[in-house]
Amino acid sequence: TYVVTENCIACKYTDCVDVCPVDCFHEGPNFLAIDPDECIDCTLCEPECPAEAIFAEDEIPDGQEDFLELNAELAANWPVINEKKDPLPEAEEYDGKEGKRELLKR
Ligand code: SF4
Ligand code: F3S
């Protein structure tokens, strides 16, 4: 499966959802999560993310491994999103900031 990681938080550009052939992105207030049971590893979303927040599960950056389980948990609670929308207003400011996981809204 592919996994959305920390740098999506407070950005939520949503370019990723337009290319997913199986609609496995789910939307929360300031983060998207991929349903690992639906993702077919097509790889299309990874290069689309302006924040470079999407990784294959075996390439998740050090220290963010828990995002694999987090994506599964959040995707189960959030509705599907399959059309791109505007990024969050603070997206540019927060792109690349450290410690964003504390800002995650559920
Ligand atoms: Fe969707 Fe493909 Fe990305 Fe999986 S790898 S989330 S199937 S676009
Ligand atoms: Fe998030 Fe990147 Fe998609 S910031 S919403 S994973 S395009």
Image: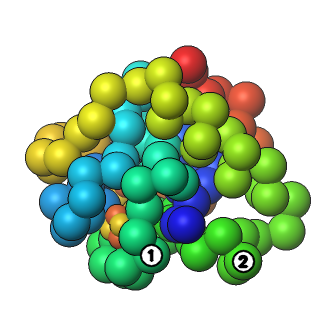
Three-letter code, disc 2 = Asp
Residue 81, given in percent of the width and then of the height, sits at 24, 39
Q: Is 18 above or below relative to 87?
A: below
Residue 93 makes an appearance in the image = no
- Label 1: few (<14), some or many (≥20) within 10 Å? few
Q: Is 99 above or below relative to 39?
A: above
Q: Quadrant of residue 7?
A: bottom right
Residue 3, given in percent of the width and then of the height, sits at 57, 60
Q: Is 35 above or below relative to 30?
A: below
Three-letter code, disc 1 = Asp
Nearest the camera: 78 or 88? 78
Given this view, does label 1 or label 2 mark the residue nearer the observer? 1
Residue 50, given in percent of the width and then of the height, sits at 37, 67
Residue 58's disc number: 2
Element type where label 1 sits in the image: loop
Does mark 1's beta carbon lie closer than 8 Å to ligand 1? yes
Gap between marks 1 and 2, in whole Å? 12 Å
Residue 79 makes an appearance in the image = yes
- Residue at 53% across / 54% down in the picture? 36
Q: Is 31 above or below relative to 43?
A: above
Nearest the camera: 95 or 2? 2
Q: Quadrant of the N terminus?
A: bottom right
Left or right: 49 in relation to 67: left
Left or right: 82 in relation to 43: left
What residue would you read off at disc 1?
Answer: 41
Determine whether label 1 and label 2 are within 8 Å by CB. no
Nearest the camera: 71 or 32? 71
Q: Ligand 1 lies in which image quarter?
A: bottom left
